[in-house]
Amino acid sequence: MHERSSVAELAKSLRVELNRYSPGGKLPSSRALVERYRVSPVTVTRALAQLAAEGLVVTRPGAGAFRAEPRTPTPVAGDTSWQEVALSADSATELVPRAVDASGVLVTLSAPPPGVIEFNGGYLHPSLQPESALAAALARAGRRPGAWGRPPTDGLPELREWFAREIGGSVTAAEVLVTAGGQSAISTALRALAPPGTPVLVESPTYPGMLAVARAAGLRPVPVPTDTDGVRPELLEAAFRATGARVFVCQPLFQNPTGTTLRPERRREVVRIARAAGAFVVEDDFARRLVHEDAAPLPAPLAAEDPDGVVVHVRSLTKITSASLRVGALAARGPVLERLRAIQVVDSFFVPRPLQEAALELVGSPAWPRHLRAVAQELRNRREVMTGALALHLPELALPYVPSGGYQLWLRLPDALPESSLLAAGLRAGVTAAPGRPYFCAEPPAGHIRLSFAGVAGPTEIVEGVRRLRTAVDELTG
């Protein structure tokens, strides 16, 4: 059983047991709880900490855990209805309302109910994460001299140098800023490059988190259609001409959600078209380290072949490690770098030094290349298992492209199978998927779902999840 579920179950049992004790009464010792419930000491410690956070238990070092005194009555709720007026008073003068729909992001961050297979995740399953290497890196980082001191606002020089080498080409450490993950970097880039009320060109479909960031900044996302070779250059050029936009956001490698990679000749065209329009390209290179074992050699980032500063490059360590290692990078050249730097400093001062030190320890350790090889092998295996299960059990769902990187498959639904109905039926059958609608900033051409094969326990769960989707389809069409 996974540690997290063990903690939840023990905490549930202890809440029931608390009723046997008077306020101030002492609970059994940690050793006794370990023996009674047959769990690890770490599980007991975490369960007691959870109850303490809920105000049910008080822990006293050296003395044990005690039932807390009864809580004071909950205060009467205030009247917050005035906020409806305050938050909407200026909406009439806003070119683009900044109310944000975060549902497309939350669906990939929320944990499913117990027993439900999670095909909507956006991160590696704990079994794929380098947990031991991360723990060792964090421990070593904490012992570094000055590890808890204030870092340079641009990031540790050694980490900036590492990111510059990863990007390649003529990118230097002086052109790199360390950020608190990729989402933060995208937010900084969009705010730096486009004033509120202006259009920003995006791939269609694209990552909902980027659409949410754009709208929160008061920008107007404008879709540019893609095919299996990436964004279509002739439509990108037409969109620049029609809108006057000065920013295009793209994921040229293993795009989310389609998994496509921008074809070599289109890569040159995209940068040329943006340069001719006097515009920037924000390159979100989020999936480079999620390459599958059988992939062909990867193209260099757009930023590595851009001497004129057209490309603002974003990358992160988060996807290949853990959702909590929020360390990424922005790379840019020319005057725009100072604007990016200023916005980041105002927003967050700097990325915590212990996280930066831990990232350095991790990528410099022998465990790092081993982890990359293991993930590449496992992602290929999971992709093949999922595509095979879909071909066997759900042949009516169209899979236009099978990627050689990333962690998801993008499926088109038959016209007779409504997206929302399928997701609801899937949940009843015990499986979740990401809805396709949030990936479009305009009307979608058809219903879609995105299935992630990285957030589940393994191949057996993938096959079972697809079988449950089959049950959901049969419920709707039978």
Image: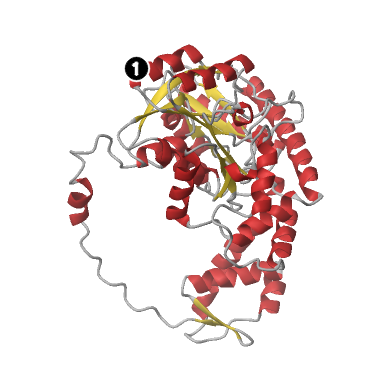
- Residue 333: percent from the left, percent from the top? 54, 37
Viewer-proximal residue among 360 and 307: 307
98 sits to left or right of 475 = left
- Residue 478: percent from the left, percent from the top? 49, 21
Viewer-proximal residue among 299 and 230: 299
Q: Which residue is mark 1?
A: 242
409 sits to left or right of 291 = left
Identify the image quadrant of the N terminus. bottom right
Q: Residues within 10 Å of mark 1 (few under 14, many from 20)?
A: few
Residue at coordinates 46% horizontally, 19% vertically from top-left? 276
Residue at coordinates 48% horizontally, 44% vertically from top-left? 338
Residue at coordinates 55% horizontally, 30% vertically from top-left? 256
Q: Residue 49 appears in which quarter of the rendering?
A: bottom right
User: At label 1, which amino acid type do we have?
Assistant: Ala
- Residue 88: percent from the left, percent from the top? 21, 45
Q: Secondary structure at mark 1?
A: helix
- Residue 63: percent from the left, percent from the top? 61, 87
Above or below: residue 281 compared with residue 362: above
Residue 250 visible at all: yes
Viewer-proximal residue among 378 and 213: 213
Look at the image and name its color scheme.
Answer: secondary structure
Q: Residue 34 appears in which quarter of the rendering?
A: bottom right
Viewer-proximal residue among 342 and 103: 342
Q: In the current view of this chain or complex, which residue is farthest to the top?
A: 234
Residue 321 visible at all: no
307 sits to left or right of 248 = right
Residue at coordinates 44% horizontally, 83% vertically from top-left? 69
